Image: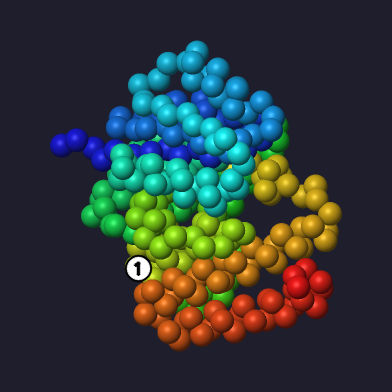
């Protein structure tokens, strides 16, 4: 029986120092029916050109697609455009940021798990991650915070960041989980929206094997921003994530959960206005 077509989705933006190591790990995946889909969001550094040269000069048994947006769209729009393309060719999408490194067995392990569970339509699979720094030195293994507390719908609904849920860098998911309901807010945490969606549909899946090296301290996890800038970013992302979750709760006929989320949005908006972060 032919194995499902799987996409290793590699979103890239200004990751020139790490993109070659990331792509090498993609090329080394041992899963047979794989498409490596590299989506550069109009990087302003050499990320795209390094990726282009890598693809040109290195052979792999996998199909490879390299695309570049003509202008920077941001991670949410880049993901939506990519997933609309991947929905046509792939049954499952495994995420690998352009500065992260997948173990060679990552795609095959996650795909076999998905198959063994009956290939659920709205699956979101997550794992622990091996934390590495900018020099690719291992620091620790991070287990998803969701594993350290009781899981129930109301708790998940009002916990909008990775500090309370899954580690998005480790994710694999079905395209339908993303495309069933469009992302309507530009600053949301896509991974935490998808975690909530999959939980509502009883398709949130945890696998306890570490399969990816997550580069912490660079990119969006970089600490090198001002406190006020960081606070504004977190606040706006939290509010947008909660707003999207409220829509998802209503679409899944969870009216009481939607009310809980509405109350949480009001708290965050009140705090944001008090601090001058929003009008």
In the image shown, does 163 or 62 lie closer to the viewer?
62
Q: Judge left or right: residue 223 versus residue 9.
A: right
Residue in the image at 64% along x and 63% along y: 237
Measured as percent of width and height from the top left, residue 169 is found at 54, 48
- How many numbered marks are there? 1
Whether residue 254 is visible: yes
Hey, which residue is sitting farthest top in the picture? 57
- Determine whether the residue tagged by mark 1 lies in a helix, strand or loop: loop
Q: Which residue is depicted at the point 26% across and 53% down?
A: 119
Above or below residue 49? Residue 136 is: below
Evaluate whether residue 208 shows in this view: no
What residue is rendered at 76% in x and 58% in y? 230
Q: Is residue 110 left or right of residue 152?
A: left
Judging by the rendered image, the residue that carries numbered circle 1 is 201
Outermost residue on the left side: it is 1
Where residue 252 appears, as percent x and y from the top left, is 37, 75
Q: Quarter-wise, where is residue 272 in the image?
A: bottom right
Residue 220 position (above or below residue 30):
below
Q: Position of residue 225 (x, y in %)?
A: 80, 50
Q: Quadrant of the N terminus?
A: top left
* Quadrant where the image shows the C terminus: bottom right
Classify 122 as above or below 270. Answer: above
Query: Observer-nearest residue: 50 or 110?
Result: 50
Reply above or below: 58 against 35: above
> Is 54 or 105 nearer to us in this picture?
54
What x and y, as percent, mark residue 136? 65, 33
Between 250 and 128, the residue placed more toward the observer is 250
């Amino acid at each position: 029986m032919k194995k499902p077509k799987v996409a290793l989705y590699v979103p890239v933006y200004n990751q020139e120092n790490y993109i070659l190591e990331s792509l090498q790990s993609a090329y080394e995946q041992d899963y047979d029916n794989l498409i490596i889909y590299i989506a550069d969001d109009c990087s302003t550094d050499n990320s795209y050109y390094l990726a282009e040269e890598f693809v040109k000069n290195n052979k792999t048994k996998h199909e490879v697609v390299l695309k570049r947006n003509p202008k920077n769209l941001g991670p949410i729009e880049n993901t939506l455009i990519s997933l609309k393309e991947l929905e046509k060719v792939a049954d499952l999408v495994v995420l690998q940021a352009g500065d992260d490194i997948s173990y060679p067995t990552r795609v095959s392990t996650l795909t076999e798990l998905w198959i063994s569970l009956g290939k659920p339509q709205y699956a979101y699979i997550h794992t622990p991650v091996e934390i590495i720094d900018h020099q690719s030195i291992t620091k620790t293994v991070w287990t998803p915070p969701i594993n350290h507390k009781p899981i129930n719908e109301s708790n998940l609904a009002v916990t909008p960041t990775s500090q309370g849920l899954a580690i998005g860098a480790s994710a694999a998911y079905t395209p339908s989980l993303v495309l069933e309901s469009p992302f309507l807010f530009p600053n949301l945490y896509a991974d935490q929206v998808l975690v909530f969606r999959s939980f509502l549909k009883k398709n949130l899946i945890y696998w306890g094997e570490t399969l990816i090296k997550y580069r912490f301290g660079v990119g969006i996890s970089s600490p090198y921003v001002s406190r006020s800038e960081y606070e504004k970013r977190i606040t706006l992302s939290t509010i947008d994530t909660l707003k999207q979750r409220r829509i998802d709760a209503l679409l899944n006929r969870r009216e009481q959960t939607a009310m809980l989320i509405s109350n949480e949005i009001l708290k965050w908006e009140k705090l944001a206005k008090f601090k001058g972060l929003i009008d």
